Image (cartoon, rainbow, N blue to C red):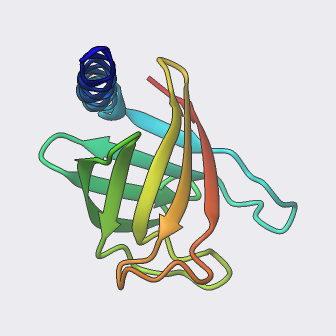
Amino acid sequence: MLKKILIISVILALAGFSFTSCNKVENKINRTWLKESMMAEYPAEIIWDFQDGGTLVRLYNAGEITDTAYYTIEKQTLFTAIKIIEAGTLSGIADPNGLFKVDEISDDKLILTRYEMLDESTEGAYLRREFLSLD
């Protein structure tokens, strides 16, 4: 009996954590984020603007080139994910489409790690993105 109560308590705690985590992402994602350059060969400034209604606008070199994509926030068992679809690809810049785990989100920092492509494959999916808030 005690074992069943413990298992139910753990399940309820995980469900509560998942719900809280998803709400935290929803409340903090809608802002403008500057993508931190991870390599020297990406000198261009890239800004990701997560807008209400699931629209993601990416601005390259102060708006010289723009790209519009769409995103949804999805609850997974142990974390919150952001699914990005219909983003265009630019020469020399990795394709941003797929499912990203929200590793960290705060008022000034966002860290995402792609773990799955849109076709549900994981081969070659790993892509880490770090951002600083511009708002």
- Relative to 38, is 17 above or below? above
Image quadrant where residue 85 sits: bottom left
Residue 53's spot in the image, x, y percent? 12, 46
Q: Residue at x 34, y 27 (%)?
A: 21
- Relative to 25, is 43 above or below? below
Residue 90's spot in the image, x, y percent? 54, 81
> What is the tally of numbered marks visible in this picture?
0
The residue lying toward the viewer, choosing from 21 and 48, is 21
Q: Residue at x 35, y 52 (%)?
A: 82
Which residue of the protein is positioned furthest toward the front in this rendering?
1
Residue 9's spot in the image, x, y percent? 28, 17
The residue lying toward the viewer, choosing from 47 and 86, is 86
- Relative to 14, is 72 above or below? below
Answer with left or right where residue 121 lies relative to residue 42.
Answer: left
Answer with left or right where residue 124 lies relative to residue 26.
Answer: right
Which residue of the protein is positioned furthest toward the right in this rendering?
40
Answer with left or right where residue 110 lies relative to residue 17.
Answer: right
Q: Residue at x 36, y 78 (%)?
A: 118
Q: Quadrant of the N terminus?
A: top left
- Relative to 86, is 14 above or below? above
Image quadrant where residue 6 sits: top left
Q: Quadrant of the C terminus?
A: top left
Which residue of the protein is positioned furthest toward the left in this rendering?
53
Q: Residue at x 25, y 31 (%)?
A: 26
Answer with left or right where residue 3 lies relative to residue 41.
Answer: left
Residue 16's spot in the image, x, y percent? 25, 21
